[in-house]
Amino acid sequence: MTPIDAKKRYTELFRKFGAQLRNPYRLRAFVTGVVLLSGYCLIYIPLNDRITELKAKLARGEKSLAIAHSVEHLRKQYQTFEKRLPTTDAKEWTAYLLNGLRRFPLRMNGVATQPPCNLGPYKVVIFRFDIQGTFPDICKFLSWLEGNERLIRVDSVSISSGKSSKSASTGNRPQNSNADLQAQITILGLTG
């Protein structure tokens, strides 16, 4: 086929096609197809990558916003008990607890401290008190610990019968509320 024949052939096809487009329904269908194809090629394909990129940015932004709300909520929670977290050391804690113990008619037989250890983001000071006194006085001391302005956790309490003036003289087990009891109390003090 020569270039002239090819040109003639294309010209003939173009005329036939133009003759087909004289029908208004076929012309509408053709124009609609051309508009849709050009819209897809000229608008959707270039913007599809941009849309995908913006969706990824939106997802990252929503995740960051959720984290920011979570941090804000945690800060509000922290502010409610921030004043209850002293930034003190074990010596100050010991002095504080001993001052609290002096409020009650209890006898201290010993105190043992352990080095501060980490509990999450906080440090915990651990104490073990060996005290002696009556049951109501020991209960009052435990109530003071639980209702304290500092964050204190009573980890364990062990109470055993001790000596009282009545039981020492008679040799019988005391049955009254004034009997001396021995208590070993393990306390965790939370610091900031």
Image (cartoon, rainbow, N blue to C red):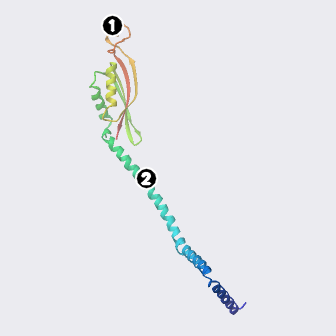
Give the labeled residue for mark 1: 169
Estimate the x, y position of residue 140 in percent, counting from the top left. Answer: 31, 24
Residue at horizontal 49 percent and vertical 65 percent from the top: 53
Identified by mark 2, the residue type is Ala
Quadrant occupied by the C terminus: top left
**Depth order, front residue of 106/78:** 78
Estimate the x, y position of residue 108 in percent, counting from the top left. Answer: 32, 23
Q: Is residue 169 above or below residue 12?
A: above
Residue at horizontal 43 percent and vertical 55 percent from the top: 64
Mark 2 Cα-neighbour bin, 10 Å: few <14, some 14–19, many ≥20: few
Q: Is residue 109 above or below residue 78?
A: above
Mark 1 and mark 2: Cα distance apart in space: 70 Å
**Depth order, front residue of 163/72:** 72
Q: Which mark is residue 66?
A: 2
Query: In the displayed structure, does residue 127 sit left or right of residue 20?
Result: left
Residue at horizontal 60 percent and vertical 81 percent from the top: 24
Query: In the displayed structure, does residue 13 sit left or right of residue 112?
Result: right
